[in-house]
Image: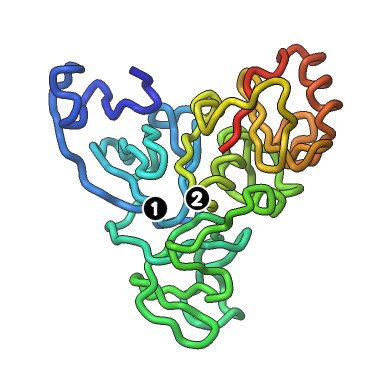
Amino acid sequence: MDARLTPANPHVAHDSLKGQVDAPTYTSGEWRRVGVGVTDLLRTPDGPRTRQTLFGDRLLQLEERDGFAFVQSEKDGYVGYVAASDLVDDRQPTHWVSALGSHIYPAPDFKRHEVHNLSLGARVTVVETSGAFARTDTNLFVPTAHLSPLSDTRADIIATAELFLGTPYLWGGNSRAGIDCSGLAQAALLAAGHACPGDSDMQEGLGKAIPANQPLQRGDLLFWKGHVALVVDDKMMIHANAHHMAVAYEGLDDGIARIKAQGDGPVTARRRL
């Protein structure tokens, strides 16, 4: 079993794993949601970041110990630890942040100091809309211009990825403050209504393989070992990468050659959604 997706640790496991893993305790867990702009999902308590979760993301909490919650993310099944203080009571979201970024305020007044910064993909539960602001279930306020109902999607994944141009590269990042290659692909695909795993090796199973003799087109995905890029057109791709240390455009031919020359090998897969 892939540890990244297996809700079990030395202390507890999800009920669904009875008979598959040994654990002192099994539990069905409790749904919580992220109550801060962004929080790191850690491999171990106080360990390295593996991914990030955004405001409003629903997490199934299996355990809380020493200030950390052991959780599994609803949106991609990723497992890890987050600061327990960053979680709040669960509530089904009604809207998502469809702008690159926004803020959530203590009052419907843009001159007030923001409570949190929000990134594209963050989710909120709106209970009332009045004028330029939507009031959430926690009595905070988000500009209505930055929100879309959960049923609305952004079909053009490249247009969504382009919103992040210039965003700093951050290993394991999933927000406008910092993002990596798989985080960029996931943000763009989730916004389009496509289910999307958290890491590039998992994303390599999305869609259908593109035959070698078939030209690439807008929205195709290119994979290398440990990397993913999105095809803009027949000459250009966009990706979050450590070469530019940012989300950037790069010529298809030049990028493929550069990545191979730096020792990361050839393209391993070409996929079309």
The picture places residue 256, in percent across and down from the top left corner, at: 79, 23
- Amino acid type of the residue tagged 1 in the rendering: Val
Q: How packed is label 2: few (under 14 Cα within 10 Å), some, or many (20 or more)?
A: many
Circle 2 SS class: strand
Q: Is residue 49 visible?
A: no
Query: 248 or 173, which is in the foreground?
Result: 248
Q: Residue at x 50, y 82 (%)?
A: 108
Using the rendered image of the protein, determine whether residue 190 is visible from the camera's viewpoint: yes
Residue 253, label in figure: none
- Residue at x-position 84% and y-position 34%: 251
> Measured along the vertical axis of the image, is residue 259 above or below residue 178?
above
The residue that appears at 40% across and 44% down in the rendered structure is 75
Q: Is residue 71 above or below residue 7?
A: below
Report the front residue among 271 and 20.
271
Q: Are marks 2 and 1 in contact (CB under 8 Å)?
A: yes
As drawn, the residue found furthest toward the front would be 213
98 vs 126, left or right, is: right
Task: Report crowding for label 1: few under 14, some 14 to 19, many 20 or more residues within 10 A (C-alpha).
Answer: many
The outermost residue toward the bottom is 131
* Residue 128 locus on image (x, y percent): 38, 81
Which residue is identified by label 1?
34
* Quadrant of the rendering where the C terminus is positioned: top right
User: Given the image, on which type of amino acid does mark 2 rest?
Assistant: Val
Residue 3: percent from left, percent from top: 37, 21
> Does residue 66 appear to the left or right of 229 in the view shown?
left
Indicate whether 103 appears above or below 26: below
Label 2, label 1: how many angstroms apart (C-alpha)?
Answer: 8 Å
Judging by the rendered image, the residue that carries numbered circle 2 is 38
In the picture, measured across the screen, residue 177 lies left or right of residue 92, that is right
The residue under the point 43% across, 62% down is 150
SS class, disc 1 = strand
Q: Where is residue 227? Give x, y as percent.
A: 64, 26
